[in-house]
Image (cartoon, rainbow, N blue to C red):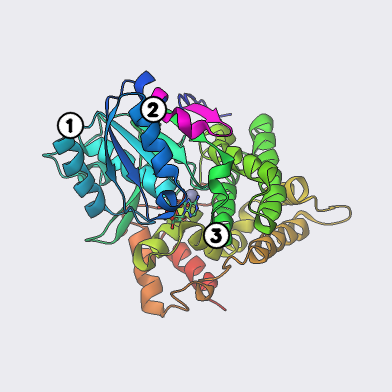
Amino acid sequence: MQSFEFLMPTHIIFGECTEQRCGELVKAYGGSRVLVVYGGDSAKKSGLIDRVTQSLQDSGLAYELLGGVHPNPTLSFAQKGVEQSVKFKADFLLAVGGGSVIDCAKAIADGSPTPDYPLWDYWSRQRPLTQALPVGVVLTIPAAGSESSDSAVLTNDTTMVKRGLNSPLHRPRFAILNPALTYTLPPFQIACGIVDMMMHTMDRYFNPICTNQLTDEIAEGLLRTVITNGKIAIENRAEPHAMSELMWAGSVSHNGLTGLGNQTDFAPHQLSHELSAKYDVAHGAALSSIWSSWARFTMDTNPERFAQFGTKVWGIDGTGKTAVQIATEAIDTTEAFFSSLHMPVSIPQLPCGKLPDDILEELATRCTYYGTRTIGSFRVLGHNEILAIYTMANKT
Ligand code: NZQ
Ligand code: ZN
């Protein structure tokens, strides 16, 4: 087991009507002037923003609203948010939405104490992040896990580079998880969330260290929970128990717990970010379009690991089968599950369609940060391997 430290300080408040406590919680965590960040119109239409602002008023807090965050949030929008935050003298960011809204709020929180520095400096590692305003979350979609992760993912809309920035400063002070807030989600977004939660766990599970029993059992249990309840939630999004399981699983899948003592891999995430950056593809769809190609390409690195995944997660009966046979069945089963959720399992199934070879080459070059890095740890991937995976995924 690798040495590790684990501090997940986010206060989780789970249950019905918990959004009505957001004023009290902001106050408890030291906020007095709150910038409320939200996305398109879903949180407005459902009346959630009204309930949130009522709660802030009831707690005697000053607030301003900043709506309009798009999925795959952009640097330019976050910069506008920093301007508003500084002008309003905000001392607390309240994100009401999903991963995109939360990450945008985190970026605004990062930029607000240092508005004279270019915000992207933190994402490009030109400048270390040493201070940020506190962030609280009212979650509306189980998916990215940003409500308790240390990460914030932003797209630089000038260079079309999508990058994550990990920092302990990115852990929200609190996250309100009321499953009823998800009942308005379209099935496509539920499916995107299911894929993303699974991938946060699988990108930690497929790594060079495969001997950590407790960590493996947590990961396998989480995956089985998401698969079982994901199917139910897709059939009936207002099924309260299934959505409750998904909402909690989404947070646990990316707060670090499912990979303790492992090395992380996250190659499928890195491969998918290039597709989202160039074509604004939904994060979960970009992941499902690439995963089975990544898995088939890397399987021979450790077929026994894929076989364990097949038997423990998918319940494949391995009697009389070789590790490679079980591993192959596990990858096919995962791919079929994504298809059953109507998620793309190849690049041509994405809105961008089949890509020409020169674009695949460009994606591979960008993914290595122009030849300055490799990705992954389960199998380390350089430019040629990345290109091979994109090429496999580009077949119809
Ligand atoms: O903008 P609105 O109108 O709210 O609509 C959103 C959006 O169109 C909609 N939605 C959310 N809650 C809803 C709802 N519609 C109806 N009812 C509700 N209750 O869903 C759409 C997608 O929202 P988004 O926030 O983009 O989804 P998600 O949570 O999947 O976040 C994706 C973003 O998070 C990043 C991704 O790269 C992507 O940018 N990630 C962040 C991570 C992190 N910070 O730890 C880790 C992840 O790996 C991921 O990279
Ligand atoms: Zn993800």
Foreground label between 2 and 3:
2
The amino acid marked with disc number 3 is Pro
Q: Is mark 3 within 8 Å of ligand 1?
A: yes
The image shows residue 130 at horizontal and vertical percentages of: 25, 29
Residue 314 visible? The answer is yes
Would you place residue 211 above or below residue 44 in this image?
above
Label 1 near label 2: C-beta < 8 Å?
Answer: no
Which quadrant is the C terminus positioned in? bottom right
Q: Which residue is mark 3?
A: 186
Circle 3 residues within 10 Å: few <14, some 14–19, many ≥20: few
The image shows residue 78 at horizontal and vertical percentages of: 25, 48
The amino acid marked with disc number 1 is Lys
Q: Which region is colored magenta?
A: 11-24
The alpha-carbon separation of the residues under discs 2 and 3 comes to 29 Å
Q: Quadrant of residue 294?
A: bottom right
Residue 150 visible? The answer is no
Foreground label between 2 and 1:
2
Residue 80 placement, left or right of 186: left
The question of residue 289 being in magenta is answered with no
In the rendered structure, which disc, 2 or 1, sits on the residue that comes first in sequence?
A: 2
The alpha-carbon separation of the residues under discs 2 and 1 comes to 18 Å
Q: Quadrant of residue 340?
A: bottom right
Q: What kind of element bears circle 2?
A: helix
Q: What kind of element bears circle 1?
A: loop
The image shows residue 226 at horizontal and vertical percentages of: 66, 47
| Residue shown at 54% from the left, 53% from the top | 184
Q: Which residue is mark 2?
A: 23
In the rendered structure, which disc, 2 or 3, sits on the residue that comes first in sequence?
A: 2
Which residue extends farthest right? 320
